Image (cartoon, grey):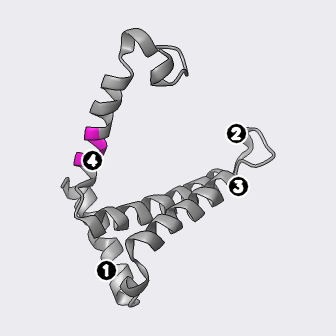
């Protein structure tokens, strides 16, 4: 794992463990927490143009999404850098540049 990502994960685990919260951080509840925080992130944009969203609130909610995602990855022993790069590779196969550039169509419609 990249050193910066490792430091983030270690800090999150230390924060969690200092508060004895690991008992609440099972995979299901971490996944639910990601969804809840993603909903809060969406709420920052609700009923306004995207440039009207409060940047600091977007920053905070995005950090919450990342934090729970890092903790879920740690729970399964996933290397965050590895799984993201693997997903980029897979998406590159599903969305080749020559077919997908400039279009928002799904891969099965290209």
Camera-nearest label, 3 or 4: 4
Q: Position of residue 54 (x, y in %)?
A: 69, 52
Residues at marks 1 and 3, CA–CA distance in whole angstroms: 29 Å
**The quadrant where residue 98 appears:** top left
Q: Main secondary structure of the magenta part?
A: helix
Q: Position of residue 38 (x, y in %)?
A: 57, 56
Q: Is residue 52 above or below residue 61?
A: above
Camera-nearest label, 1 or 3: 3
> Left or right: where does residue 89 sit relative to residue 27?
left
Residues at marks 2 and 4, CA–CA distance in whole angstroms: 29 Å
Marked residue nearer the N-terminal end (3 or 4)? 3
Secondary structure of residue under mark 2 = helix
Tag 2 near tag 4, CB within 8 Å? no
Residue 83, numbered label: 4
Marked residue nearer the N-terminal end (1 or 2)? 1
For image coordinates 30% across by 32% down, the residue present is 90
Camera-nearest label, 3 or 2: 3
Residues at marks 4 and 1, CA–CA distance in whole angstroms: 23 Å
Q: Is residue 89 above or below residue 45?
A: above
Q: Is residue 102 above or below residue 51?
A: above
Q: Which residue is mark 3?
A: 43
Which residues fall within the magenta stretch? 82-86
Q: Which residue is mark 2?
A: 50
> Left or right: where does residue 85 sit relative to residue 28?
left
Residue 110, numbered label: none
């Amino acid at each position: 794992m990249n050193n910066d990502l490792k430091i983030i994960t270690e800090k999150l685990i230390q924060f969690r463990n200092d508060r004895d919260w690991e008992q609440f951080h099972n995979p299901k509840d971490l996944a639910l927490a990601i969804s809840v925080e993603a909903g809060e992130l969406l709420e920052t944009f609700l009923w306004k143009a995207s440039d009207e969203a409060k940047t600091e609130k977007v920053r905070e909610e995005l950090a919450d999404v990342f934090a729970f995602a890092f903790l879920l990855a740690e729970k399964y022993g996933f290397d965050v850098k590895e799984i993201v790069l693997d997903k980029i590779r897979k998406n590159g196969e599903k969305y080749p540049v020559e077919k997908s550039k400039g279009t928002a169509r799904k891969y099965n419609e290209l």
